[in-house]
Amino acid sequence: MRPCPRLVLAAVLLLAVPSAAMAAPAYVGTWGVTAAQCKIPQERQGAPLVMKAKGYDQHEAHCTFTSVRKSAGAWKVAAQCLVEGSRQKDAFALKVEGDTLILTQGKVARTYKRCS
């Protein structure tokens, strides 16, 4: 049985054309409050924030995103975290403006610059 030429063409096109859904979110990267923080290794206190599409790491804090919703130019995130050996839930918003990441938890906002 031969494969349908249209199905083969559709499969090739899906693999060849990158999808916007497949692109990494703008918040992915390494972020520091200062340029000096960007140089601190993860095994030391004060290390930069390393954001991935589905979680982040920062020294002894490791979070896995359980929900990410894009809303009004920001991402609303729910996370399950392990902080210094203690499990906890977290919720925050991420917004990227150029090379600036704004992480907001409740009424507290922290601003980070993208590390080069």
Image: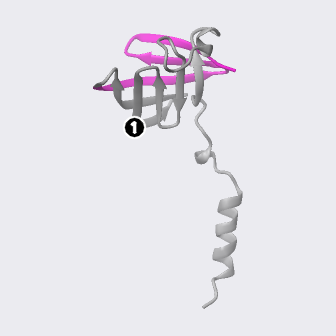
Residue 60, position as x, y percentages in the image: 41, 21
Q: Residue at x 60, y 91 (%)?
A: 1
Number of on-image labels? 1
In the image, residue 110 above or below residue 71: above
Amino acid type of the residue tagged 1 in the rendering: Ser
Q: Is residue 110 left or right of residue 78?
A: right
Pick the residue in front: 99 or 32. 32
Quadrant assignment for the C terminus: top right
At x 52%, y 21%, the residue is: 42
Instruction: Please say whether residue 4 is one of the residues in the magenta stretch.
Output: no
Q: Check if residue 91 falls in the magenta segment.
A: yes
60 sits left or right of 87 in the view: right
Circle 1 residue: 67
Quadrant housing residue 35: top right
Q: Position of residue 63 (x, y in %)?
A: 40, 29
Q: How are the residues colored? A: one colour
Residue toward you, 102 or 39: 39
Residue projecting furthest to the front: 43
Quadrant in the picture for residue 99: top right
Kind of element beneath mark 1:
strand
Residue 43 in the image: state x and y as whole percent: 49, 19
Main SS of residues in magenta: strand
Q: Which residues are magenta?
A: 87-116
Residue 46: % across, % down: 50, 11
Residue located at (37% from left, 31% from top): 79
Q: Which quadrant of the figure has residue 23? A: top right
Q: Residues within 10 Å of mark 1 (few under 14, many from 20)?
A: few
Residue 85 left/right relative to 58: left
